[in-house]
Amino acid sequence: MSAEPATTIIDELRRALGDDAVLTGAEIGERHRGDASQTGRHLPKAVLRPASADEVAAALRICNAHRQSVVPQGGMTGLAGAANPATADFALSLERLAGIEDIDRAAGTMTVKAGTPLEMAQNAAAAQGFLLPIDLGARGSCQIGGNLSTNAGGIRVIRHGVTRDNVLGLEVVLADGTVLTMLNKMAKNNTGYDLRQLFIGAEGTLGVITRAVLRLKPLPEGRSTALLALAAYDDVVALLNRAKSELASLSAFEAMWQSYFRFNCEAESLRLFESAPPFAVIIETEGAGHDAALEAFLEGVLTDGLIADALIAQSEKERRSFWVVREGLAMDRLLPSLVNLDVSLAIGSLGIFAAECAMALDRRFPGCHVSFYGHIGDSNLHVSVSVAGASQADLHDIDEIAYRLVAQYGGSISAEHGIGTLKRDYLGYSRSLEELGVMRRIKQALDPNGILNPGKVLKR
């Protein structure tokens, strides 16, 4: 973005941050090329590694003065290309800004730095007898700042909400280096505009999150897990409604369509049912009396014919076998050109959407792999599509088919993965022209020089 020699900026940044906090040339590792979507094509011109909010502020102040674009990077587990740099960009890595600052037992909160891995924060909370409700499959490598910047979802949303529901306060650095310290610990704080919500889910385009105050909950006494077989999607919805009514301890409700369940059982050499049912559902409960409550519930729905079969995990190994199938990690290894879409629709529409989406994709790509799974209880559906030898045009067609159908059903093209670059061109399918206009005005107000993650969420 700047016509000035990069060395001028680099010298200023090294004086402000230290030589070891500014990487250039061969010092830049491959991991800074892009996120887990594997769509990153370029290494950044430099990598900045600040160790405090003041250093983040200094770095942004210098970059803003030089009109130098900056791409914030966390654990690089995103799937929308939001952390992918261009060759002219500087990457701002938050990996050195890590650690738990405070666990307030009275308030039930944790104050944590943005570069802290989610699992580290979870373990710190558990050691004090608390549950950090945010939970994702990438917990070992994703970072708190990235979780907040993408408003990550995960498997516990039905009980604990999405990430933004578990955030009480933030510290954020704006593009010009201004530090907003909003480390509120109160559930009630009705003092005008709730500025923290601007930055949660903004994917680093409005400011860089450096610290957060997160809600904690009492650590559950235990957890019970069951895998159920069902005949139809309407039965899945009826089961969900009954589970929400009768299981106060319900913490997860995950559904898998037959093709997804069969593929992953075979890939993991698991035979959980005699044959793959039309739908398989994982129900998980937590808290006191969870075992007895789940068993009584399953007895009732089995007697009423709502489910065809049920397996209750008798060990952690059995529990993990259920979740291994649900996580579907073998698909990335075994299916060529795999595309994983993440959409949200009204719960009652998910079944017909999946059927129509599968038919439309098979018409365009005869014999392709199409399968569905999702959290369901929070209206989130994932679509896995594999077309052997797919070209870029083919990948575009997959997106277009699915997202146009999402728009017809009044849904969201992104339930939990964000927009980044991969969904940016389809944002108009879920947001009106008026909404997009307001989003651009907010971006212009907070980042008038357009240095923060340019081209992500909104077009340049």
Image (cartoon, helix red, strand yellow):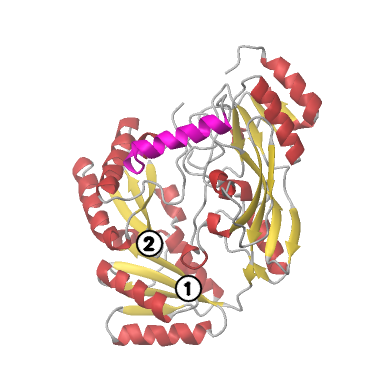
Q: Amino acid at mark 1?
A: Glu
Mark 2, secondary structure of its residue: helix
Q: Main secondary structure of the magenta part?
A: helix
Camera sees residue 286: yes
Disc nearest the viewer among 1 and 2: 1
Residue under numbered circle 2: 266
Query: Which numbered disc, 1 or 2, marks the residue that appears first in the sequence?
Result: 2
Q: Give the extent of the magenta segment.
A: 428-447
Q: Amino acid at mark 2?
A: Glu
Residue under numbered circle 1: 284
Q: Residue furthest left?
A: 363
Q: Quadrant of residue 215?
A: bottom right
Residue 458 is situated, as x and y percent measured from the top left of the image, at 45, 33
Please say if 366 is above or below 66: below
Q: Is residue 362 left or right of residue 325?
A: left
Q: Nearer the viewer, residue 398 or 6?
A: 6
Magenta highlight on residue 440 = yes
Please say if 241 is above or below 346: below
Query: Which mark, residue 240?
Result: none
Camera sees residue 336: no
Looking at the image, which residue is at 59% across and 48% down?
196
Mark 1, secondary structure of its residue: strand
Residue 24 is situated, as x and y percent measured from the top left of the image, at 69, 24
Looking at the image, which residue is at 51% across and 80% down?
314
Looking at the image, which residue is at 45% across and 82% down?
294
Magenta highlight on residue 201 = no
